[in-house]
Amino acid sequence: MRRIAIALCTGMAVFFTLAAVTSGVATRPVVMTAHDLRRGRTITARDLVIREMPVYMGQGSTFGAITQVVGRVAQIDIGAGTPLFHSLVGSVPEVPQHFTVLDIPISGSVADLRPGDEVALTDPKACVREGCADERHMLAGRAVVMGPSRINAGDGMTSMPFAVDQESAGRVLTARESATVIVVTRLRADAGNG
């Protein structure tokens, strides 16, 4: 009986000690992903959850309210349950003045493009004949990526929304209507995106 009492007292002492230590750890709300998010996705409230984390973990570099994140864009693929650090999400780019947004069929590697990146759009037929460096084949010297690429259900082609100036929009629309796929060339990444 004496051994049982000692074991019981020891167990209770450990329990109360752990309870006292863990209750003293300060926590704060942290926004985390509710499920996997694909790079380039515009984040909605359904994509997010709030969890309590110790204050010392990621202090100052994570978001504390869902409203701070809704409408932003995932800069990389983000796994479920990941705390959202400021570097993981960026702002949705604004359409520059006198630009219009077009959904454009594209070819080439677009895996590295994210909203806010600036690219040049060229006519691939002319590129095959004379090379893409020739400015005569430039459809848009500056186009801003406005969202992630997507595969069209009807024809299986990949398209992406771009903001282009009004003068370039006519050339891009003509090329798009003739079933020409636009080649994308990176100019620079938007510095204000992260």
Image (tube, helix red, strand yellow):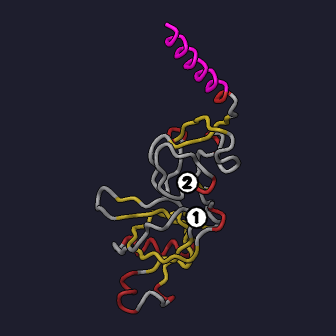
Residue under label 1, please give it: 116
Q: Residue furthest front?
A: 2
Q: Residues within 10 Å of mark 1 (few under 14, many from 20)?
A: many
Q: Residue at x 52, y 63 (%)?
A: 114
* Tag 1 near tag 2, CB within 8 Å: yes
Q: Can residue 18 be found in the magenta stretch? A: yes
Q: Quadrant of residue 167?
A: bottom right
Sooner in the amino-acid sequence: mark 1 or mark 2: 2
Q: Which residues are magenta?
A: 1-20
Q: Main secondary structure of the magenta part?
A: helix
Residue at 57%, 55% in the rendered image: 88
Q: Amino acid at mark 1?
A: Gly
Residue closest to the eye, 18 or 194: 18
Residue toward you, 20 or 43: 20
In the depicted structure, whether residue 139 falls above or below residue 162: below
Q: Residue furthest top?
A: 1
Taking the magenta stretch, the answer to whether it contains residue 19 is yes
Q: Secondary structure at mark 2?
A: strand
Crowd class of label 2 (few under 14; some 14 to 19; many from 20; radius 10 Å): many
Location of residue 178 by image quarter: bottom left
Q: Position of residue 171 (x, y in %)?
A: 47, 76
What is the x, y in percent for residue 28? 67, 36
In the rendered structure, find residue 73 and report the number of the disc placed on it. Answer: 2
- Report how far apart the C-alphas of labels 1 and 2 lie in the structure: 10 Å
- Quick check: 26 above or below 192? above
Residues 177 and 128: in front is 128
Quadrant where the C terminus lies? bottom right
**Element under label 1?**
loop
